[in-house]
Amino acid sequence: MRKVKIYALTLAFAGGIGLTSCEAIKNTNNTQRGVAIGATSGAVIGGVLGNNVGKGGNTALGAIIGGVVGGAVGGVIGNRMDKQAQKIEEALPGAEVERAGEGIKLTLGENSVNFDLNKSTLTSKAKGNLDRLVPVFKEYPDTNILIFGYTDSSGSDEYNLKLSEERANSVKAYLGTKGISASRFTITGKGEEDPIASNDTKEGQAQNRRVEFAIVANDKMIEDAQKEVKN
């Protein structure tokens, strides 16, 4: 089984804010990383790291980093996200699951939720793979799910932006028919931004026609984590 990819995002003060050494990161687990992140506020982390890994926070990874709670509470949330990420990996091996800070980045590409050229309609394969995620999303109801839609580079910028939003909305709408509350979702169209493969080949274009999720704690999960820490 492929291990869930982990972005270790710990901060330290040494004459200013800087990234910890790779060796130090390797000697911590995800819960400890969440506590380490709490050495600074979520706002500081979002400002320092958002531009590097989230391009201002308007991507799945940026949204996760910008919403960091931190401290012992962040450690509790991180532990819960570890478990959810593993469940997603087991349910849908074709997806790319990445643990970052206190959230999960989930990329649904050509091997899980793909789109035909110039289409926003979910294929039967896409629906089947989303069905596999539904039980996990229901098992962990105390999360918000941000959906980012993408296109390849064919077509105008304006057209691609609209199409990408329609793709994200198609995923949201389908999951809604499976009993996932619409209030948990936020959708964003990204057009042809942030390609993960070359748009010079049909294969690369297919990979870029994708959807990414940022799964983050909602207010209830944060409140529950705060109570757990106090106890």
Image: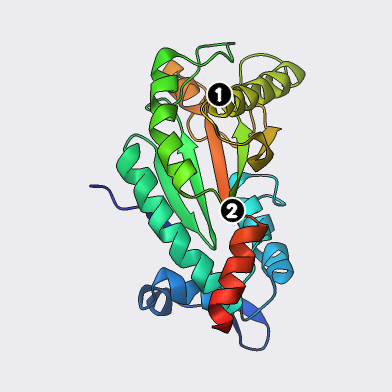
Mark 1: secondary structure: helix
230 left or right, relative to 160: left
Q: Is residue 153 above or below residue 141?
A: above
Residue 191 sits in which quadrant?
top right
Q: Could you say which is closer to the camera, residue 14 or residue 216?
A: 216
Report whether residue 49 is seen.
Answer: yes
The foreground one among 84 and 231 is: 231
Q: Is residue 188 left or right of residue 28?
A: right
**What amino acid is at disc 2?**
Val
In the image, which disc is placed on residue 177? 1
- Image coords of residue 105 (percent x, y): 51, 48
The residue at 42%/25% (across/down) is 110
Earlier in the chain: of badge 2 and badge 1, it is 1
Nearest-to-viewer mark from 2 and 1: 1
Q: Which residue is mark 2?
A: 216
Q: Residue at x 51, y 73 (%)?
A: 75
Q: Provide the secondary structure element on which disc 2 rests.
A: strand
Q: Amino acid at mark 1?
A: Thr
| Mark 2 vs 1: CB contact within 8 A | no
Q: Residue at x 55, y 13 (%)?
A: 121
